[in-house]
Image (cartoon, rainbow, N blue to C red):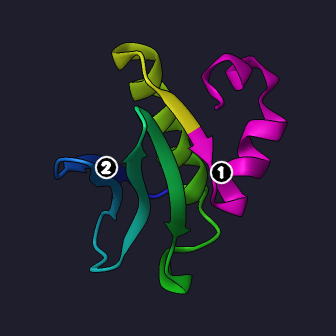
Amino acid sequence: MDEVTITRHDAGNRGEYRAHVKDSRHIGRLTWVLRQGVRVADHTLVPPAIGGRGIAALLVEALVEDAREQGFRIEPQCSYVAVAFDRHPEWADLRD
């Protein structure tokens, strides 16, 4: 896989995870909004130019890793995130 770097950008009650692929100007994103103490994962967007590399999965994994470390729960409103949670029953304790 191409080199991918995930960065986190929080802005109060909302934020996003960004996937930067080496030698590409395109950025994958997973956005969230805070509602009643739960991070609602509302959109996962990966441009076609960098698609097919597992980038969306890396974004979800970064969100899950932060939930484990920081102690928050996730509501997977985005269909991609919901399917990822269905595929990973070990994440069930983080799902709201």
Q: What element carries label 1?
A: helix
Q: Label for residue 46?
A: none
Q: Residue drawn 43% across and 24% down?
A: 72
Q: Residue drawn 69% across and 59% down?
A: 80
Q: What residue type is labelled 1?
A: Val
Q: Residue drawn 34% across and 18% down?
A: 70
**Which secondary structure type mostly characterizes the magenta part of the structure?**
helix
Q: Residue furthest front?
A: 36
Q: Is residue 16 magenta?
A: no
Of marks 2 and 1, the one in the foreground: 1
How far across and down, in percent of the image, does residue 59 sit? 48, 49
How far across and down, in percent of the image, does residue 7 sit? 26, 48
Question: Is residue 95 shown above or below 43?
Answer: above
Q: Label for residue 81?
A: 1
Q: Which amino acid does label 2 sit on?
A: Thr
**Which residue is under mark 2?**
5
How far across and down, in percent of the image, does residue 20 sit? 31, 62
Which segment did they paint magenta?
75-96
- 30 sits to left or right of 23: right
In 3D space, how far apart are the residues under numbered discs 2 and 1 (Cα atoms)? Answer: 19 Å
**Between discs 2 and 1, the one toward the N terminus:** 2
